[in-house]
Image (cartoon, rainbow, N blue to C red):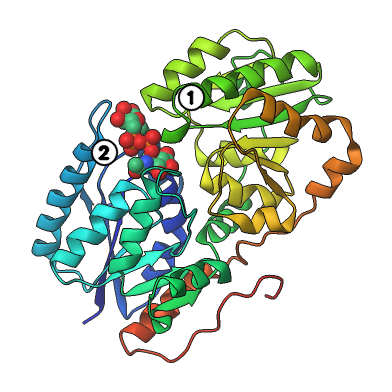
């Protein structure tokens, strides 16, 4: 009997990073991959499911308008516990640090079903930042039987917390696998797709320098997001060749501020959330990336794009150490402008950050996750871990 592996996810980034893992398990006769979405996100999740052609077996549809963290947690916990009881998976697989991940791991723990955690061991060491994600990933790691750490640093974080070494495998980040999978498919932006995205305003002139902006984190709601918008408006005024594209997350707290402060500002385009291919294409064409997203921090180095992280801390210091990302610190307009200035005005400073190397993975993370899972079930021996710079 193949082992039943239940993949549980609820938001866009989890779907992107689990898609290659699901594909890898589908190829193995020893496993049967079953997919459950909580539907913590609706539109943004459906986009990715479509782009990666994932087959969804169970959908809990828990999203409500302006949902609270307690709504998501209770909805997912109850719905998942019922499902686990019904279909009895041999292993529940979750990815990352959203509320779906925490609830998915906890529901499995209550039923004594082993949990595999993809992207285990990321830590900012500050429970308030990112909130509530730092707590979510600590809890998921605490109950997981299998830890798939993307980097050696993540493994060290887990060992320091007393997590058993034997449960940890350094795999690389699956986002690099996801990128490799779609890289060949990214379409060159035709005039038609440019018009579709930007309303035919022709703001993507060849000579212009494109800034890709994304911001959606809870700790940036309110004042910090206003400061980000203020900095963006100032940048567009100061650098006549700069164009900013901001795909605005559907969270109403983000939508309200972004529209109020940036709508109609010249050379700033607000778009609906982009589908993954468009986002990657935009990333490929960008000059500079400003973001508070975790996934984009990992994707930008694959294209040699400097990243300014719109946060006080990052749980992904590997890119900072490699020299391709910088943390803004306190999110103020002044700090953002100060960090952007050398990148726009000093070619050498730009070149130093734009070196292409990706410390996060080599495209074989999903394969290593399958091998480590085989080992867990006594189906095969050891797995060679990910070592940056070696493939
Ligand atoms: C969540 C995750 C965050 C992750 C982000 C990725 C938690 C606590 N936060 O944040 O870690 O980085 O997703 O995007 O799990 N909405 C829609 N349609 C959608 C998606 C969202 O309308 O497709 C709106 C809903 O009104 C919803 C609100 O966004 O109530 C907030 O969603 P929620 O999942 O609570 O938080 P995010 O900010 O999306």
> Which quadrant of the view contains residue 102?
bottom left
- State whether residue 5 is above or below residue 54: below
Q: Relative to 364, is 116 on the left or the right? A: left
Q: Relative to 209, is 16 on the left or the right? A: left
> Which quadrant of the view contains residue 144?
bottom left
Is the distance from the Cβ of mark 1 to the nearest ligand 1 atom less than 8 Å? no
Q: Residue at x 32, y 61 (%)?
A: 140
Q: Residue furthest top?
A: 264
Is the distance from the Cβ of mark 2 to the nearest ligand 1 atom less than 8 Å? yes
Tell me the SS state at disc 1. Answer: loop
- State whether residue 130 is above or below residue 388: above
Position of residue 289 measured from the top left corner of the image (x, y, whole percent): 67, 37
Q: Which of 285 and 11 is in front in this view?
A: 11
Q: Relative to 297, is 72 on the left or the right? A: left
Write down which quadrant ligand 1 falls in. top left
Q: Which of marks 2 and 1 is in front?
A: 2
Disc marking residue 272 = 1
- Residue 50, can we see it? no
Q: Mark 2 points at which residue?
A: 69
């Amino acid at each position: 009997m193949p082992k039943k592996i239940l993949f549980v996810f609820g938001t866009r980034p989890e779907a992107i990073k689990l898609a290659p893992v699901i594909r890898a398990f589908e190829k193995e006769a020893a496993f049967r991959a079953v997919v459950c979405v909580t539907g913590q996100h609706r539109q943004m999740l459906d986009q990715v499911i479509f782009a990666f052609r994932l087959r969804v077996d169970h959908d809990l549809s828990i999203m409500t308008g302006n949902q609270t963290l307690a709504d998501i947690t209770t909805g997912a916990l109850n719905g998942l516990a019922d499902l686990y009881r019904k279909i009895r998976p041999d292993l529940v697989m979750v990815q990352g640090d959203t509320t779906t991940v925490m609830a998915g791991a906890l529901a499995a723990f209550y039923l004594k079903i082993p949990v595999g955690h993809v992207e285990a061991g990321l830590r900012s060491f500050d429970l308030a930042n990112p909130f509530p994600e730092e707590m979510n990933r600590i809890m998921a790691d605490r109950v997981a039987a299998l830890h798939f750490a993307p980097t050696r640093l993540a493994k060290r974080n887990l060992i320091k917390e007393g997590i058993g070494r034997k449960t940890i495998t350094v795999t690389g980040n699956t986002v690099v696998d996801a990128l490799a999978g779609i890289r060949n498919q990214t379409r060159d932006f035709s005039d038609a797709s440019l018009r579709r995205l930007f309303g035919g305003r022709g703001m993507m002139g060849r000579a212009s320098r494109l800034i890709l902006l994304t911001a959606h984190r809870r700790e940036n709601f309110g004042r910090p997001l206003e400061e980000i918008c203020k900095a963006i408006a100032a940048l567009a005024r100061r650098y006549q060749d700069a164009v900013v594209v901001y795909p605005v997350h559907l969270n109403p707290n983000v939508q309200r501020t972004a529209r109020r402060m940036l709508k109609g500002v010249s050379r700033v385009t607000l778009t609906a959330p982009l589908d993954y291919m468009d986002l990657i294409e935009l990333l490929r064409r960008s000059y500079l990336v400003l973001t508070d997203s975790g996934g984009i921090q990992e994707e930008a180095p694959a294209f040699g794009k400097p990243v300014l992280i719109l946060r006080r801390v990052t749980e992904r210091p590997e890119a900072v150490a490699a020299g391709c990302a910088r943390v803004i610190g306190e999110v103020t307009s002044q700090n953002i402008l100060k960090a952007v200035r050398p990148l726009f005005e000093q070619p050498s400073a730009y070149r130093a950050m734009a070196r292409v190397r990706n410390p996060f993975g080599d495209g074989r993370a999903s394969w290593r996750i399958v091998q480590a899972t085989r080992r867990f079930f006594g189906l095969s021996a050891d797995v060679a871990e990910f070592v940056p710079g070696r493939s």
